[in-house]
Amino acid sequence: MSATMRDVARRADVSVKTVSNVVNDFPHVRPATRERVLAAIAELGYQMNFTARNLSLGRTGMITLAIPKLRLPYFAELADEVMGAAEARGYTVLIEQTGGVRQREIDLLASERRRMTDGLVLSPIGLRAGDGPRLETGYPVVLLGERSLDARVDHVVMANVAGARAVAEHLLAAGRRRIGLVGSYEAGSEGAGYLRTRGFLEALTAAGLEHDPALTAPAEDWTLEAGAAATRRLLDSGVQVDALFGLNDVLALGAMRVLFERGLRVPDDVAVAGFDDIEEARFSRPSLTTVRPDRAQIARHAVSLLAERIAVGSGDGVPPVGGPAFVADYALVVRESSAPAGR
């Protein structure tokens, strides 16, 4: 016979309600009690009947993940992590693509489709600071990414400034001084492009260097083709570079292809680095130096926050307000594309 919640309660010497609070991740359960219940669950092999739980609570058992484009490798890999984290909590994930278009992101927040799911994990690109109140609808929302929307919702971000600074410091330590920057950001925004550029420039300033504007290769779209086109324009201008930093891995890989076309050796002539550590970065030739944000941590934390908002907010329709944005861990991954000059 399968173990029941009552069996778990007896083994842990707690009430059935306490077991329910633990399996539903409700707050305000003492750590020692939670550990005792979890140990009893493991011993008895108890499995939560998520369908019955959702029906009893008036929930769908589904959450929405809204991302700009699933075809972009970073977001595809992030979606995979979110789906895994959600499944562990008994949720199914519905994926929406916004294209990074502001109106589509606004429409999603106001859409009747919200009734199909219990909460939303949103990675906005189009929304602006004045759009913050649109997020405060009583519907559980957790933000991903770097948009500063001044909204009373939970927010999970990556260490863009610190990560980009680490890349630049690595390239400088390898003897590179003419470092081209591949990518761009919208003026006045504080998204990933702005923050990564800021970290890059901070490292140069700390080293007593100034960034030559001629070394910037703008690319509004962060795609392979955009990275390649931006690098062609940079090289065609006649500017001399000994390194390129793509604001994401896709831009860097596009740039690396153009260097190969022009007969420039990576890393001997030009070192290359990116950001995001997508799967292709490990398998490119040469393999790509990059910043690895902890996507699994981002996904787990976002889903955990959303589950808490769903649980606490289910009674009165007003989700709880989180604290400061959670900043996920990162690591600089040094690979073949940025070996020190002369090696």
Image (spheres, rainbow, N blue to C red):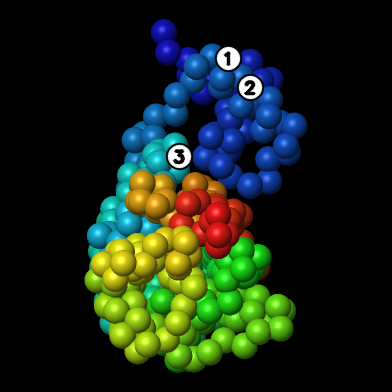
At label 1, counting other C-alpha atoms closer than 10 Å, the crowd grade (few under 14, some 14-19, many 20 or more) is few
Circle 1 sits in a helix, a strand or a loop, which is it?
helix
Is 63 on the left or on the right of 322, as rendered? left
Amino acid bearing label 2: Ala
Q: Measured from the top left, where is residue 290 in percent x and y?
A: 49, 58
Q: Measured from the top left, where is residue 188 in percent x and y?
A: 48, 91
Is 226 on the left or on the right of 295, as rendered? left
Are the two marked residues, 2 and 3, in contact with CB atoms closer than 8 angstroms?
Answer: no
Residue at the spot 35% in from the left edge and 41% down from the top edge: 55
| Lower position in the chain sequence, tag 3 or tag 1 | 1
Are the two marked residues, 1 and 2, in contact with CB atoms closer than 8 angstroms?
Answer: yes
Residue placed under numbered mark 3 in the picture: 89
Circle 3 sits in a helix, a strand or a loop, which is it?
loop
Residue at the spot 57% in from the left edge and 86% down from the top edge: 211
Circle 2 sits in a helix, a strand or a loop, which is it?
helix
Q: On residue 43, which mark appears? A: 1
Amino acid bearing label 1: Glu
Q: Distance between the residues labelled 1 and 2?
A: 6 Å
Q: How far apart are marks 3 and 1 (CA)?
A: 19 Å
Q: On residue 39, which mark appears? A: 2
